[in-house]
């Protein structure tokens, strides 16, 4: 059983292994079935080990999350975290939210799924709806799809002409740089699956009546443009992997690795935020004495006529 310190060290190693340096990206050279940083478990099921480990990491994540939330409430820190999840259909974005983000305290989590823009959103700059969804101080924000769709689907499906989508890379970089400067830790994750695995998962969506609701015929149209999407992803990642807000490519054909790796990315960043509980200025002795002397303590009853604290 690793200690919490071991876990944080390993998480930083995983982050290093998955981080994309600015420059070009060759998605074809990254095996979607690979498991960078995953410890070798001789004689043990990797799936079961991952599940148990993700639960342990989840406990650590919520402990860090609580510090960040408490500090924001006290006004001593404005730090917050944004997890951007991108990936083709069936890459596991929803599953990652359920399995990894699900370990956090929902009180301090803000999840936003981005679909095709509404008429109102279309009337604004493409970053308008993104800006409105940014996590408040102390929160973990999660984007299920994001502003990157505006250089992915918008480009591949020619929703806007090249002279509109091309300048967007720079606009995204400026937007994210400003967010980082304002205290947001931005973690951008591409869930990288293979063409074959997507085929298997789409087939399962069709064949399994409990998964059929997830099937969208448009997904098959997008699958026909697989190479164009991969090229658009490679460009977006290469152009927008900045030192302030790098991209991480998570091999995602194996769900147990995908969950473990993403949990580690969150852990490395939350640990590095190093937000601690706020120092609370209280006359502790006086408050305890007040509590001890509080009416109702011995009788377990409030004296008549004394209003309840939260009474309106
Ligand atoms: P899903 O994530 O499967 O619920 O589907 C959401 C759909 O919304 C996907 O087909 C995306 O391509 C689409 N979408 C998300 N953002 C945009 C955008 N900015 N412009 C056009 N389509 C988008
Ligand atoms: Mg879809």
Image (cartoon, grey):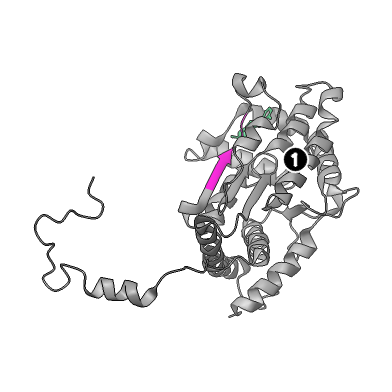
The quarter of the image that holds ligand 1 is top right
Residue 166 appears in the rendering: yes
Q: Nearer the viewer, residue 126 or 25?
A: 126
Q: Nearer the viewer, residue 160 or 308?
A: 308
Give the vertical position of 118 relative to 78 (above or below). Answer: above
Q: Residue furthest right?
A: 23
**Image quadrant for the C terminus?**
top left
Q: Give how far across and how far down residue 36 sits, in percent.
A: 76, 64
Say if 172 sits above or below 289 in the image.
above
107 on left or right of 162: left
Q: Quadrant of residue 216?
A: top right
Q: Which residues are magenta?
A: 110-115
Tell me, yes or no, whether the highlighted magenta stretch contains residue 16.
Answer: no
Spot occupied by residue 167 in the image (x, y as percentages of width and height): 85, 31
Q: Residue at x 59, y 48 (%)?
A: 141
> Does the beta carbon at disc 1 come under 8 Å from ligand 1?
no
Front position in the image: 39 or 72: 72
| Residue 166 horizontal side relative to residue 159, left or right | right
Residue 114 included in the magenta stretch of the image:
yes
The residue where tag 1 is placed is 175
Residue 45 figure quarter: bottom right
Q: Which element carries disc 1, helix, strand or loop?
A: helix
Q: Residue at x 71, y 26 (%)?
A: 125
Q: Quadrant of the N terminus?
A: bottom right
């Amino acid at each position: 059983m690793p200690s919490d310190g071991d876990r944080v060290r390993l998480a930083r190693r995983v982050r290093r292994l998955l981080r994309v340096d600015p420059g070009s990206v060759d998605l074809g050279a990254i095996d979607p079935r690979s498991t960078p940083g995953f410890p070798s478990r001789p004689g043990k099921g990797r799936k079961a080990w991952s599940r148990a480990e993700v639960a342990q990491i989840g406990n650590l994540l919520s402990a860090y999350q609580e510090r960040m939330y408490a500090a924001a409430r006290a006004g001593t820190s404005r730090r917050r975290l944004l997890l951007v999840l991108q990936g083709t259909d069936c890459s596991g974005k929803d599953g990652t939210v359920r399995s990894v983000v699900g370990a956090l305290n929902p009180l301090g989590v803000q999840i936003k799924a981005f679909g095709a823009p509404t008429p109102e959103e279309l009337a604004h700059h493409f970053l308008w709806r993104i800006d409105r969804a940014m996590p408040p101080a102390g929160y973990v924000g999660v984007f299920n799809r994001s502003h990157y769709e505006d250089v992915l689907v918008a480009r591949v499906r020619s929703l806007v002409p090249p002279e509109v989508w091309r300048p967007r890379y720079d606009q995204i970089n400026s937007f994210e740089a400003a967010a980082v400067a304002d205290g947001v830790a931005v973690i951008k994750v591409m869930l990288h699956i293979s063409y074959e695995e997507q085929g298997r998962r789409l087939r399962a969506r069709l064949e399994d009546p409990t998964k059929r609701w997830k099937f969208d015929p448009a997904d098959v149209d997008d699958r026909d443009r697989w190479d164009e999407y991969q090229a658009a992803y490679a460009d977006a990642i290469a152009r927008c992997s900045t030192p302030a807000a790098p991209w991480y490519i998570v091999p995602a054909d194996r769900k147990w690795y995908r969950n473990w790796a993403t949990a580690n990315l969150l852990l490395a960043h939350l640990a590095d935020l190093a937000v601690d509980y706020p120092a609370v200025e209280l006359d502790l002795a006086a408050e305890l004495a007040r509590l001890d002397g509080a009416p109702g303590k011995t009788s377990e009853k409030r004296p008549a006529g004394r209003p309840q604290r939260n009474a309106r």
